[in-house]
Image (tube, rainbow, N blue to C red):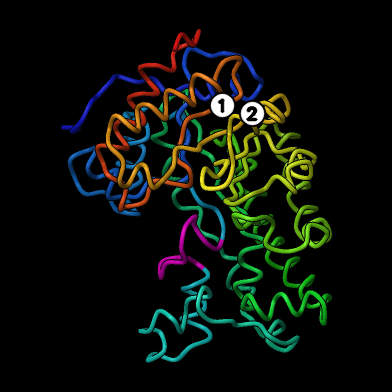
Amino acid sequence: MIKGIYRDFTPDFERIRKTVRHEEPDRVPLCEVLIDYQIQSLFLGRKITADDIESQIEFWVHAGYDFVPITVGMMTPGKVTDESLIARVIREKLLNDSDTLDERSWNPEYRSFIETRQDFERFPWDILENLDFSKFHKVQKILPDGMKVIAVTGKIFTLTWMLMGFNHFCTSLILDEPLVADIFQRVAEIQFQGLEKIFSMSFVGAVWVVDDIAFSNGPIIAPQAFRDHVFPWYRKMAELCHKRNLLFFMHTDGNILPLIEDIIGLGVDVLHPIDPTCLDIIKVKEEFGDRLCLAGNVPNELLRNGTSDEVTHYVKKLIRYCAPGGGYCVGSGNSVPEWTKYENYMTMRETTISFGKYPILI
């Protein structure tokens, strides 16, 4: 039995499409790129694992979402885990047995693997091309009517600097830009190969790129470097999505205001999460909301340490100021990790369901 507040939801991806078109569906959609399996397990009242796609779909349906996110790429949203493709390949092809036991030896968050042209050429790119589509094949058979899959990819920027190490990446942008460009291209090509396969799957409704490109005080690297090496790939991705009537979502933390015109120009349909640690989503909505659908913004610190009343107040404020006329989906200010207070997660979604009915009257 599902614990917590249960409702007989009927998923409808058209609810997302209407919101993106700045129309008002029946209610404000819920939107998350990642909800930890521990939170899903608490909701369903039984343990959910990464391989249990049936239970994952059950969670996303009964929790009130219109889609289920599934990763296609070398790294899932969040931190690099030892189950991610990039980590497995590094452990199997570049390290010895003793090294693989130490997370700092195989995790590109802690260690660089490409410092020279020779490192780039001998890196096992061919193995990384073998992306896993097993979840997509499983979900096709059990996805409820009206529900869609959102294919999660991206990290073209993040994976490139991780593979090089951040300091070396930054200096190489100046001293060896051709090497950096080649790594960007190789990472992007692998991600695009994955997308080519999912584009033929009629149950996929959108592509969601996850790639943090800003700190709280602004872009991580010079805006022109993004324009030269990263944004062209995402523009092409958006074009391919729109050609197939798919939506194009983008996630990035940080203060993206210096880049927001670029992001709009890429063809992004939904921008997530409008980082509450450094951005005022109401001001962003007022200035750019007619050209973007916004999603997220409920602070993770609030979900972790706030009271239920505080969460309710914040979500109601978001609905009041951002939801009228469409163009907004409720979600966290990043994702829903395992340390989220379960009661606060439930309050966020229940407040949305209770007060997010159109027309907005709060």
Q: Image point 58% across, 37% down: which residue?
A: 280
Q: Is residue 174 left or right of residue 144?
A: right
Q: Mark 2 and 1 residues: CB-CB less than 8 Å, in contact? A: yes
In-front residue for pair 245/357 = 357
In terms of secondary structure, where does tag 2 sit?
helix
What is the magenta range?
A: 74-85
Which amino acid does the dot numbered 1 rest on?
Answer: Tyr
Q: Which residue is mark 2?
A: 285
Q: Is residue 67 left or right of residue 284?
A: left
**Main SS category, magenta section:** loop
N-terminal of the two: label 2 or label 1?
A: 2
The correct choice, above or below, for 294 with respect to 352 in the image is below
x, y percentage for residue 123? 64, 81
Q: Which residue is mark 1?
A: 328
Q: Image point 48% across, 47% down: which residue?
A: 334
x, y percentage for residue 93? 52, 83
